[in-house]
Amino acid sequence: MRAGPAARRRPAKVDAVGWWLKAFGGLVVVFFILPTLFVIPMSFGESTTFQFPPQGFTLRLYENFFTNPVWLASLGNSFIVATLTALLATTVGTAAAVALSRMEGRLARFVRTLLMVPIVAPAIVVAVAVYIAFLGWQLTGTVAGYVLAHTAIAVPYVLVSVTGALGGIDPQLLRAAASLGSPPWRAFLRVTMPLISRGVLTGAIFSFIVSFDEVVLALFLRSPVFHTMPVQMYNSVTVEIDPTISAASSLMVVATTIVFVLPQLLRGRARRR
Amino acid sequence: MSSNTIKWSNRLLLVPALALLAGILLVPLAGTLVRSLSGTGPDAGLTLRNYANLFTDGVTLTVLGRTALTAAVVTIATLLIGYPYAYLMTRVGPRARGILLVIVLIPFWTSVMARNFAWIVILQDGGPVQTLFAFFGAEDVVLYGTTAGVMIAMTQVMLPFMVLPLFSTLGAIDRRLLLAARGLGSSPTRAFWKVFWPLSRGGVMAGVILVFTLSLGFYVTPALLGSPQESLVAQLLAQRTTQLLDFAAAGALGMLVLVVTLVLVAWANRMGGTVSAIGVVAAGRTRSR
């Protein structure tokens, strides 16, 4: 967006990376990173609007976030919903991934595609359908409603990460366990589970984040007495102009960065060792 | 244990996932389908009138057109930005490539609300972007509350979906073909258009269809950054459901959007494994490279 038209043409030399290509890459990197960083200085400002650049330096917004009962309740609700979603989605998704890894043919492919539908179907269409159905089942505004809806969209992420982990298992190991007299369930617990534990953990973290961050379904399932933090953030820019959202946003950005970047750094170190 | 028992225990493991999918997704969507086909008042019963109304009510077609235009602009923007970026990724060392990949996934990690709030701050009247434009002499550039602002914010989120399929396609192209073309006397530009571009077309198609399709369903970004007078299809769907309580019309619109999306995704999937591409975007968050 920010580069000139010249930057979009190919390099002049076939096998050297042109300086302008690197410069263009740098601009794109800025486009990726910069917007997110704007929320952090905002969160220390004194203003009661969304004015930028922020004036002064204060921790008032953080204080408000951690003492205001409405914000605290939404944070607590998000934790409850996301934890239950992670547990349910990981169990259900891991079971499905294990079953599918042992199956072949059209049926398995069909089921796999079917289970991926929740992440390709437009969230708004799903949200509207779920909203009307849940109204009838009296699940709107309940923990169970949030957890079930979020689990449905989190399962594909578990499926992907556990399937990836299962693909890395040497089938000889399971045959060895069987030839040594281990029944299939014990081979699963003692051989398969430890080997896919990282994939299962990844799936659990994804489903937690997917649920914690989910807005569209949450907006439709909300009730005056129960909603999650993304809904509260949505309210704070639409219904009321509440700059506490910049503190909430900064905390979310820092938390997700830690969750996603930390494993990368740790893995990089483990590989080098 | 007989192989039959194993087969059935396998199928048993699939039951919870399928039951959940059926109960939470398929049953509500079936309800949407039924409502979209039901008449109201005197002419109750099976009817296609709700679908016919979509094309005659004067509003829906305008909104659908605006949504398709927005998605198309976002798709072109992500392609123009994503292609050189993906190309750069294939040309740098493994370490730099890892960093570029982590960066491309940043919009994907960051909380949806945090990201949209950041765009509100940046694009708002009197905000940094307006100040920047004013500095260069363009005094009254308004982006907040316009479709252009929505497009800018959407482009940022959609870039991973363009860059990742492109990266895998561009990385697989044999660069010696370019050298051969140059050796045979073609100019760099000509070598690119005659050799490199045709070979990259599969990834371009996959990325284009994927970004276009996902862009059709955006709700939060247009609701927060756009204007109610220039709403996109997701806003119209929400409005008909929660404000107008016109479940039949909303059902028809929802089914239309769903079918278009699934058909496009199935097509893209044939072009180059798009459902798995989404999986890669999802899983790439930790399994980078």
Image (cartoon, coloured by chain):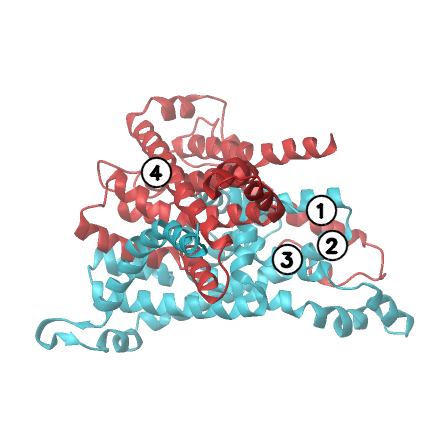
Q: Name chain B's colour.
A: cyan
- Amino acid carrying label 2: it is Thr
Cα separation, mark 3 vs mark 4, equals 33 Å
For the residue pair A2 and B160, the one nearer the viewer reads as B160
From the image, state whether disc 3 or disc 1 is nearer to you.
1
Mark 3 lies on a secondary structure that is helix
Mark 1 lies on a secondary structure that is helix
Instruction: Residue A60 in the image: state x and y as whole percent.
Output: 41, 22
For the residue pair A144 and A45, the one nearer the viewer reads as A144
Mark 2 lies on residue: B90
- Amino acid carrying label 1: it is Arg
Residue B28, compared with residue A234, is above or below; it is: below
For disc 4, the neighbor class at 10 Å (few under 14, some 14 to 19, many from 20) is: some
Assign the C terminus of chain A to one quadrant of the image: top right
**Which chain's residue wears label 4?**
A
Instruction: Residue A91 in the image: state x and y as whole percent.
Output: 40, 41
Q: Which chain gets the red colouring?
A: A
- Does residue A65 appear to the left or right of A252 in the view shown? left
- Amino acid carrying label 3: it is Gly
**Which chain's residue wears label 1?**
B
Mark 3 lies on residue: B82
Mark 4 lies on a secondary structure that is helix
Do callouts 3 and 2 point to residues on the same chain?
yes
Mark 1 lies on residue: B97
Instruction: Residue B262 in the image: state x and y as whole percent.
Output: 43, 66
Do callouts 4 and 2 point to residues on the same chain?
no
**Disc assigned to residue A236:** 4
